[in-house]
Amino acid sequence: MNDTVIKTIGLIGAGHIGGQIARLAVSNNYNVVISNSRGPATLSALVAELGPRARAATPADAAKAGDLVVVTVPLKNYRTVPVEPLAGKIVIDTYNYYPERDGHIAELDKESTTTSELLQAHLPTSKVVKAFNHIYAAALTTDGQAAGTKNRRALVVAGNDQGAKATVTRLLDEFGFDTVDAGLLKEGWRIQRDTPGYGPRRTAEELRRDLAAAKRYADH
Ligand SMILES: NC(=O)c1ccc[n+]([C@@H]2O[C@H](COP(=O)([O-])OP(=O)(O)OC[C@H]3O[C@@H](n4cnc5c(N)ncnc54)[C@H](OP(=O)(O)O)[C@@H]3O)[C@@H](O)[C@H]2O)c1
């Protein structure tokens, strides 16, 4: 059972994915507090577009203000995510690992951990939920459909806290998507780059098949 009431969504990162999640959030009547690395003044155009439900802040202030916070910065910067203001909160992680962009991370190369488990270790008391990592940013505002629509697109969630996953599942439903639960954070590799479900439009049934068919790099 999870009774977290979400009124304000904090965003750490306001690029392709962060901007799109902010658009979905305001169009579903959430307040958003967005942040980036260069400072709130650089987000004035996006705040103006988003309207009165949006404001820009520092990452620490966005983390503090959010009832739920989305971390959507390049993975290589995960250690800069503020820890204390996220304590106890649901944190959605959208990370993907691209060594050419993020630099090599030995545990990920060895497949002994996952991107979300790295963030969970950095945020030990937060409830990290992996979501949004396998949909192109642009599709977030074009592919959503009302609950119950036949062949509705589905997105994966993974997480160690069932209540947090239930909250994120409700949010995704409001944003227009069905959800497939991949299990614990350690199962998140099943939807990382180079797996069948990474990128294309999939229904829940198709996505469940994709998760089951995913192979470790070592088994390719
Ligand atoms: N693009 C996609 O279609 C897509 C889809 C699914 C998942 N993802 C994943 O989602 C994450 C974000 O991707 P993206 O495409 O949205 O990246 P992006 O367009 O490059 O945006 C990154 C955002 O993070 C901010 N940022 C960077 N370092 C930061 C820090 N240390 N503290 C606070 N903010 C920081 C950037 O701000 P500044 O510009 O001020 O540095 C920018 O607003 C990545 O892990 C990516 O793999 C992307």
Image: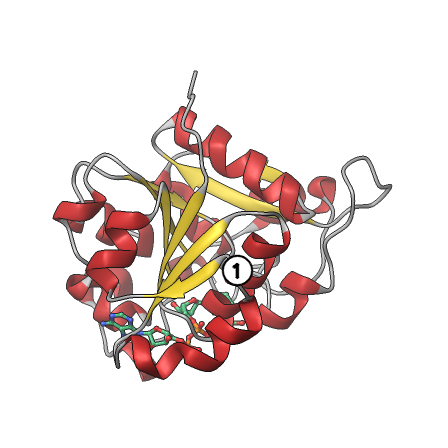
Image position of 52 (left or right of 4): right
Q: Let me know if residue 111 appears in the view.
A: no
The image quadrant that residue 205 belongs to is: top right
Q: Which residue is mark 1?
A: 21
| 215 on left or right of 85 | right
Q: Secondary structure at mark 1?
A: helix
Q: Nearer the viewer, residue 18 or 208?
A: 18
Where on the image, by quarter, is ligand 1? bottom left
Looking at mark 1, is its residue's CB closer than 8 Å to ligand 1? Answer: no
Q: Judge from the rendering whether residue 46 lies leftward or rightward of residue 72; answer left or right.
A: right
Q: Amino acid at mark 1?
A: Ile
User: Which residue is painted at 30% across and 68% down in the image?
Assistant: 75
The picture places residue 140, in percent across and down from the top left corner, at: 63, 62
Residue lying at the far right of the rendered structure: 150
- For the residue pair 158 and 214, the one nearer the viewer reads as 158
The answer to whether 1 is drawn above or below residue 114 in the figure is above
Crowdedness near tag 1: few (<14), some (14–19) or many (≥20) residues, C-alpha within 10 Å: many
Who's the residue at 59% across and 69% down the image? 136
Q: Residue furthest front?
A: 52
According to the image, what is the colour scheme of the structure?
secondary structure
The answer to whether 79 is drawn above or below residue 4 in the figure is below
Q: Position of residue 215 (x, y in %)?
A: 49, 54
| As drawn, 40 above or below 62 | below
